[in-house]
Image (cartoon, rainbow, N blue to C red):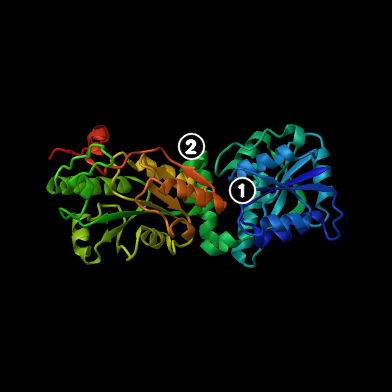
Amino acid sequence: MISVIIPTLNAEARLAACLASVYGESGQNPCEVIVADGGSRDRTREISAEAGTIWVDAPRGRARQMNAGAERASGQILLFLHADTVLEADWPVAVTRAAAAPGFQLGAFKLRLARRGLAYRLIEFGVSLRCRYRHGPYGDQALFVRRDDFEGYPDIPIMEDVELVRRHGPARLINKIATTSADRFSRDGALRRSRRNRETYRRYAAGATPEELLPYYLDERRRVCVFCKRPVAGKVKTRLANGVEGRDGAEGIPGIGPERAVRLYSKLVEYTVAQVDASSAETVVHFDPPEARAVFEGWLEPTPGSAREFRPQVPGDLGARLLDAFADPGRGTSTVVIGTDCPGLASAHLDQAFTALHSADLVLGPTADGGYYLLGAREPFPQLFEDMPWSTEQVLAETLARAAAAGLRVAQLARLRDLDTSEDLAALQGELKSAGIDSDS
């Protein structure tokens, strides 16, 4: 028997056609179909159930999902099929015959792109040459292998198909067609996307890691929104400046004075923006008050080679301002929002956040006081911001609870400490020194 393993993530638009091609016109194809899902929030589960497939909840990531499906499979042949691909009729006979042939190690279908036009035919021709002379099919070509020979996909975000071919190749191309969606090609431009694919493979062969290549392959836009205020004594870092009164007999926390506090705040802003410049992201400075644009544009002038946008913060509470930062991100955009209170924040944390968003819906950088210093997502989630008890120690816990209720997958970074009071200032001397910030001036 053949086990067909389909990794899915919000695949409702294509899954039904894919499953219909697997089962055949009258559902007669002798196969086991496993849908390994990475956390879909659309009708993927419902469509899968209607077709009678086996459902597997898996860690997000195509390689991880296919490995989870393979663990559940009981067939002697494992066929890995993308949810936006349909198979030619009577495919099981060709797959079974190929897998039984002497010397078989790995099989694949011929590729067809579901779009008319000369550019798409040229791409198909190029793939056929690659398969003929380099025995290197792509994952879109419904790779299949004998169960006893399968060693698992490596846990990498892309290039898992290349590694499978390396482990099991050379691949045997059968005389059946897998027709796959050309959406990415038509959206990015067929030849431009083809060149990007080839360049990704070239860089990988030259030693680049999948993690390094992923943003380029996805044509991903990364942006960091930095929330900051005009540095005016008495208007910023007021708890640090004025101190905190004691409660219930407890001793209060002294302040360091408004002038020293504003100087320290200014240095924190400059340090934070420099960390964004050192990352792989664009900078969007969300400033307040709105009439201070000229102040911020002169103060935080972009360094050569960096991209910077200045936007006034919208009226309302922090929730409204956060929702505005995530609104209309654009295709392929990952957004991370940070403040300027955390001297322990480094460009590495930002890069880690963007990497985490490839397998999570939401990434949080928790703080020691129950809040967060970083929030990242690829789309807005209004339920995380509305009626939130801001500036309390419940913010992180409440955000995690709401994310869980919405079925969001959450990644957390290292816990850091914000600089809000003189007590924090004393505890963060090491981080300030590492950041090159003189807290005594």
Question: Whole-percent x and y of residue 403?
Answer: 51, 51
The secondary structure type at the circle numbered 1 is loop
Q: Place residue 45 in its image quadrant.
A: bottom right
- Tell me, yes or no, if residue 374 can be seen here: yes
The residue at the far front in this view is: 249
Residue 171 left/right relative to 253: right
Residue 7 left/right relative to 354: right
Amino acid type at circle 1 is: Gly
Question: Whole-percent x and y of residue 388?
Answer: 42, 55
In this rendering, the answer to whether 438 lies above or below 281 is: above
Q: Nearer the viewer, residue 63 or 226?
A: 226
In this rendering, the answer to whether 133 lies above or below 427 is: below
**Mark positioned earlier in the residue sequence (2 or 1):** 1
Whether residues under marks 2 and 1 lie with C-beta atoms below 8 angstroms apart, the answer is no
**Residue where numbered disc 1 is placed:** 38
Residue 207 tag number: 2
Residue 180 tag number: none
